[in-house]
Image: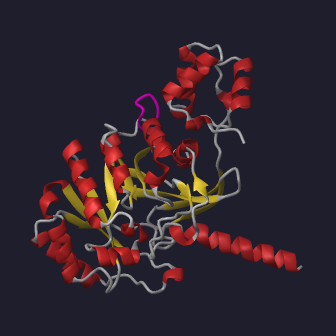
Amino acid sequence: MKPSIYGLTRDELIDWAEEHGEKKFRATQIWDWLYRKRVQTFEEMTNLSKDFIAVLNDSFCLNPLKQRIVQEASDGTVKYLFELPDGMLIETVLMRQHYGLSVCVTTQVGCNIGCTFCASGLIKKQRDLTSGEIVAQIMLVQKYFDERQQDERVSHVVVMGIGEPFDNYTNVLKFLRTINDDNGLAIGARHITVSTSGLAHKIRDFANEGVQVNLAVSLHAPNNELRSSIMRINRSFPLEKLFDAIHYYIETTNRRVTFEYIMLNEVNDGLEQAQELADLLKDIKKLSYVNLIPYNPVTEHDQYSRSPKERVLAFYDRLKKNGVNCVIRQEHGTDIDAACGQLRSNTMKKDRQQAIAEAAD
């Protein structure tokens, strides 16, 4: 399989062009065609010679993803199921926010983190996505609007889809630099958020990158016993180690950290856990923010259910009384396969059932 040209940063594209006997400005022209004009074939790059277009076609594919399913919710949320060149499936989600169009991208095929409530981890990690495959998700969502001649552009990106972004660190960093490039999509760094389940050593690395991208940590429990029971990663990176890295990140960058907290009924949503969470964050209250997330039920994880509204509000009030910045996240796409990984998992089940039926015939 040829690599996607989206996998090259602008500097790498310049180096590649020069290695193939072209001037630097040729790479700049290609970059403009890719990210400003957003062409779908190399042949559309009309200011390039036919010979150079042939070289591009021999060296790269342009878009490595094929659209399998599109689900549109009544609130404007759009969920895409994309097929990779090797036949594997990933999900991407477009959310309409009051501040613009936000896209949630996937970074791995499957997930090995092992959170017991999550649909993404139902299928173990098969491989990392290349940076080109991650960029392509943004490009195909933008194409969705371009083809409808809607004057809208992707303005925000969250790296919170299937997989652990910091377990695919190099490709995710290349992706961030590509979409942030001022000469391309120009998505502002402060409009991009990367989420991690708590790889402490990678949080430290990220602090040293010098990027202005936002960091979110999937916390979901305020003590080691509970967190280890629902998030296997806590056994390797317990809260003490995780918060050492978070303090290092804050001291190094002076940037705020968002904590994601899925509300699981009578598991982590009591007033005792709310107070524990407030105590855990007391030293970094001014540079932290808690996002309370309604749980999207997953059939395979029927031991969990969504916290009732009154428990969520009581939890929220306890945090606020302790001076913790927090919000109850607005829901998106509740009338489609809302949980991350749910569409992919359901589609794979149907594909297996169809294959079995065809074999029986």
Residue 29 quadrant: top right
Is 184 in the magenta? Answer: yes
Quick check: 207 above or below 45?
A: below
Residue 232 quadrant: bottom left
Residue 99 visible, this angle:
no
Residue nearest the viewer, comparing 335 with 286: 286
Q: Which x, y percent locates residue 305?
A: 40, 84
Q: Residue at x 32, y 78 (%)?
A: 226
Q: Which x, y percent locates residue 98?
A: 33, 55
Q: Quadrant of the N terminus?
A: top right
Q: Which x, y percent locates residue 35?
A: 52, 34
Q: Residue at x 21, y 65 (%)?
A: 326
Q: Residue at x 73, y 73 (%)?
A: 352
* Magenta residues, start to end: 180-185
Quick check: 308 above or below 195?
A: below
Residue nearest the viewer, comparing 33 with 221: 221
Is 275 in the magenta? Answer: no
